[in-house]
Image (cartoon, rainbow, N blue to C red):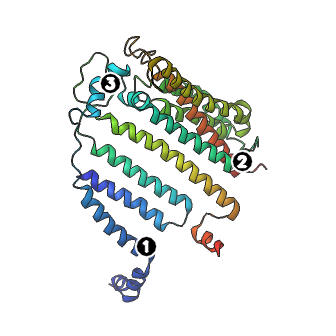
Amino acid sequence: MLYNFVFVLLFMLGFYTILIKKNLIKMVIGLNIMEAAVFFWVIAVNYRGGVIPILKNGVEVVDVVNPVPQALILTGIVIGASTTAFLLTLIIEINKYANSINMDFLKGLRD
Amino acid sequence: MKGINTLINKKSLYNLLKKREFHVSFVLLLLSVFLFSNFYYVPEQEIFSNSTAEHIINSGVKETGSLNLVTAILYDYRAFDSLGESTVIFAAVSAIVLILSFKTLPVSSKGLSFIVKRTFGILTPFVFLYAVYVITHGHLSPGGGFQGGVVLGTISIIFSIVYGSAYDYENYSPKAKTILETGGALLFVFLGGLGFIIGGYFLSNFNPTRSGLGTLISAGSIPYINIGIGFKVGAGLAIIFYTMIQKTYVEE
């Protein structure tokens, strides 16, 4: 399945970004890419053809996409936005105290 | 030929093997093979008979009065879940305000040029209209409280960037944002309590089939919950943005 391949590729791209990049904001971007990969996979694996789950008044239901994963992913997106905002706040505070958001520099500060 | 020789000489290969990027890529490649081989055998997700999804698709409109089935799940079947979700936003906003202490610094950015200000003066009312449309038609068309609330939150961001944060402070003060956010959350809880009195359990949808399907005022309590959530999310985003910019730019 193509979507499995795309999911693994995106997930690993995000993971690679978190492990390699020194800039804290780039690490948050990597976390967001991983999140987006999981959301994409859950939506893609549940798609088996059909129209959007918004019905028309008086028209008989024939072929509708499963609405349950969409509602769950909506919850996930909101939680992801909240955690991203919180992480960025922590980065602002780190920058205020250490004047840098570079991981190497911050590690040196600890010693 | 010379380029190829330098490319494959021993020293550069040795340097490549010593690099951190190479090690990480190797481990991640192994991990991705493992992940792919596992995810490849996930069975195709069908809509089984007698499942939750089938029940919602077949009788969701009859039970909730909402044509948008995702909204029906979010604000009727799993409304308690949405209450927890809005609590997460509230916790995030509280933590951010707590960390970046709520200082009422009026000026932190001066605003953009005259042309941009005029353009957004024409554009902003339509952005507001679109946000109100997305929020109030959550049970009829794509959208709902969370999505419309994000559009509503962008208006405060437009004020701060285009007109300068002093304008945002005067016309849409942090106090008003706080009142809107807590008011939205309280409206949600109040509707839940009303459902407890009328329907018998917390957040039950009262009288969903009273008025006709597909009209603006239908689907019982869903539109009102949407309005509460929309104000809450919009004001929460505005507070997050305002709290973040007030410290990053210093008044000159």
Q: Chain of mark 1?
A: B
Looking at marks 2 and 1 on the same chain, the residue that comes earlier in the sequence is marked by 1
Q: Nearer the viewer, mark 2 or mark 3?
A: 3
The residue labelled by disc 2 is B101
* Residue B21 spot, x, y in % from top left: 43, 73
Determine if residue B27 is in view: yes
Q: Is label 3 in a helix, a strand or a loop?
A: helix
Query: How much space separates mark 3 and mark 1, taking CA atoms?
Result: 51 Å
Q: Amino acid at mark 2?
A: Ser
- Residue A62, x across and y down, in percent: 21, 26
Do marks 3 and 1 share a chain? yes
Q: Residues within 10 Å of mark 3 (few under 14, many from 20)?
A: many
Residue A78: where, in percent of width, then height?
A: 48, 41
Q: Disc 3 is attached to a residue of which chain?
A: B
The reply to whether discs 3 and 1 touch (Cβ–Cβ < 8 Å) is no
Cβ atoms at labels 2 and 1 below 8 Å apart: no
Residue on which the image places disc 1: B21
Quadrant assignment, res B61: top left
Q: CA distance from mark 2 to mark 3?
A: 45 Å
Residue at point 45%, 31% (across, down): B79
Decide: is B125 above or below B105.
above
Q: Nearer the viewer, mark 3 or mark 1?
A: 3
Helix, strand or loop at mark 1: helix
Where disc 2 sits, the SS reads loop
What amino acid is at disc 3? Gly
In the displayed structure image, the side of residue B145 where residue B31 appears, left or right: left
Could you tell me which residue is drawn at 51 percent across and 22 percent down?
B224
Q: Amino acid at mark 1?
A: Glu
Residue B60 marker? 3
